[in-house]
Structure formats: C-alpha cells, structure tokens
Image (spheres, rainbow, N blue to C red):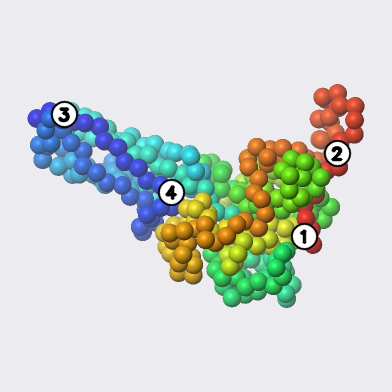
Amino acid sequence: MGFPIPDTGAVTEDVGVVGGFLTASGDIDFGPFTNNDAGEWTAETITGSYGSQLVIDDDGVWVYTANNSNAAIQALNTGDTLTEVFTVSSTSGDTTITITINGADEPPCFVAGTLINTPQGPRPVETLRAGDKVLTRDNGVQEIRWAGRRRLALNNGAAGNLQPVRLRKDSLGPGVPEHDLLLSPMHRVLVAGAQVQMLTGATEVLCPVKHLLNGQTIVQEQLEEVHYHHLLFDAHQVLISSGCASESFFPGRVGLGGFEDETRDEVFGIFPELRSLPETYGDTARYVTRRHEGALLKQCFRPVQTFLAGLRERGAKTSPLPMATAFRK
C-alpha cells in the first residue's frame, strides 16, 4: 500500500476570492509506487490560524479555505508569506499538508475624511463618485472614471503594514500639508527640491509615504479600523489634498493585484484592455522612487532639530543642505 506522502498547496492574498475566502485543494496520496488510498484517510476538519480550515475526506481529497480579510493576511506585502502546516492521518500513519499564503501589495489610497480639491472647493474623498470632477496638478479639471472603497479591521497586531501614515502639518515643508493628512502606507506623495534632484536626477518624484516615516512628523497610526478610498482617471494624475500633492490610483499589475476579484472586475469593466495588458494605461505621472531612494529622501524630512543633532553627533562642520520640499499649489 505504501506510505502517506506530504502534500502542499498555495493561495495568494486577494486573488481568486470567493465568498470572502481564499481556496486551495488537492488529493494527498500514498507512495512511492501506489495511489491506492481510497477510504484509508481520516475524514476531519482542522482549524487553522487565519480564519482558515482544512477539510479532508477518507479518500485524501482536501480543501483549504482562509478568510481573505484576516488581518495577518492583509498585512502581507508582495514577497511576504505565511505558512500553515496541517497534520492528517491515515491507516498507514500521519503526514502533513503545508499551505503557503502569498502576499500582495496593497494599492495606494486616501483615508476617509481626506479633502480633495475640486472646482467647487475641497470635498471629502468618500463623497466623490465616478463622473465627479476634481482638480489635478498637471491637467486641470479631470473626471473620475472609477471610485473604490474598502473597510479594513486593524485591531490585530499583524495588521501593522496596513495602518495609515499620518503626515503632520508642515511635515514635508511649510504648509505641506496644511493640516494633518492620513494616507495608506504605499500612497505616493510628490516631493521636490535640490536634494531630490541630486538623489534621483528628477526635479519632482513620487515617493511612498511609508518610506518617509521618521517617528515624529511622519508616523504610522494605530487604528482599530480604516476606510480606504481610490480614485481612478483616464491617466495617472497628481491630486491636491490639504496643500499636499499625491497620486491617484495607478492600475498597474501591483495596484490591481491588491484588489479582490470583484473589485478588479469593476475596473476591467471600464478599462477592459487592462485585463491582459495593464501597461496600456500609460506611465506614472512622475518617476517613482525605489525603497533605497526613499530611505535617503527621508533624511530631507526629519525634524530640523533631529537633523542638526545627527550632524553634530557625526562631527559635521558644515551647514546642512536646504531641506527638500513637497510641491504645493
């Protein structure tokens, strides 16, 4: 009859979600030379750690499900994984089924309450709908083609990667932002200045706010829940919120990969070509900084006292370069 052979499966955050659950399945076998294991397995349901469970029948056919909204799963980024190992039994002994949960980056988005500049004045992002007009940095008045929203429960320590980032008043420069501003961690703000050009070769760049965290003026919140909102246009735009310039939603492979299937289908209904060729949407409105560039740019937005203290600790004898500023209009 042989002996039970370990089996594996995998799911990916926000991909193939049905009824709120990620699903994988398989048929564990005896080996090495026979698959004659019908009726030899212990039929049972085993509870996992992520709103998950594995159900196996007496023929070894198994189905794994996990709650896609589980905070630990939603906290994963691309390249991150979680692993669950289930021990299953048969007449010839025990073995394991190992499930890998793959992460996906969350799309950039505004937190509910963020004021977006429109021709009629600032409006809370949650009140905007497809067809509404907003003011953009580069192209004047533009029409929203799609507006999405998502509520996330964050009352779990594993949800740290999803916690919004607070840009305190003046944290990116005088009046930038004019008031405290909350954005999702991967939301990219427009920054400019001599140091930006020196580091990147571009006069203005888009940088994820999570790369600018300094623990004082740019900090990550600890909320129990958050409502994130997305605004999509015919082309990638730079929007103005409380004096701070930042991006609209960019539907590239990473951005779309952060949505559940139902939400992606909404976007594909408006831009069907994105289903097979996301690159047809066009380029980002500005060069997007890499993680290592963001780490360097972060030094431009440290509180002045901290910045000068750091120079003194290193024995610097020269004055610091002028701090970079965010574009403001």
Label 3 secondary element: loop
Q: Quadrant of the C terminus?
A: bottom right
Residue type, mark 4 in image: Glu
Q: Three-letter amino acid code at disc 1?
A: Gly
Q: Where residue 57 sits in the image (x, y, percent)?
A: 18, 44
Residue located 33% across and 50% down the image: 23
Q: For the point 86% across and 23% down, which residue is it?
A: 315
The residue indicated by pointer 1 is 243
Q: Disc 3 to disc 1, how far (Cα)?
A: 66 Å
| Residue designated by label 4 | 13
Disc 1, SS: loop
Closer to viewer: mark 3 or mark 1: 3
Question: What percent of the width, then of the height, locates residue 104?
Answer: 48, 47
Q: Badge 4: how crowded within 10 Å, few (<14), some, or many (20+)?
A: many
**Marks 2 and 4, how far apart at CA:** 43 Å
Kind of residue indicated by mark 3: Pro
Residue hosting label 3? 32
Circle nearer the viewer, 3 or 4: 3
Asked if disc 3 and disc 2 are in contact, CB closer than 8 Å, the reply is no
159 or 146: nearer the viewer: 146
Circle 4 sits in a helix, a strand or a loop, which is it? loop
Rounded to the nearest angstrom, the CA distance separating label 3 from label 4 is 33 Å
Left or right of residue 238, residue 71 in this image: left
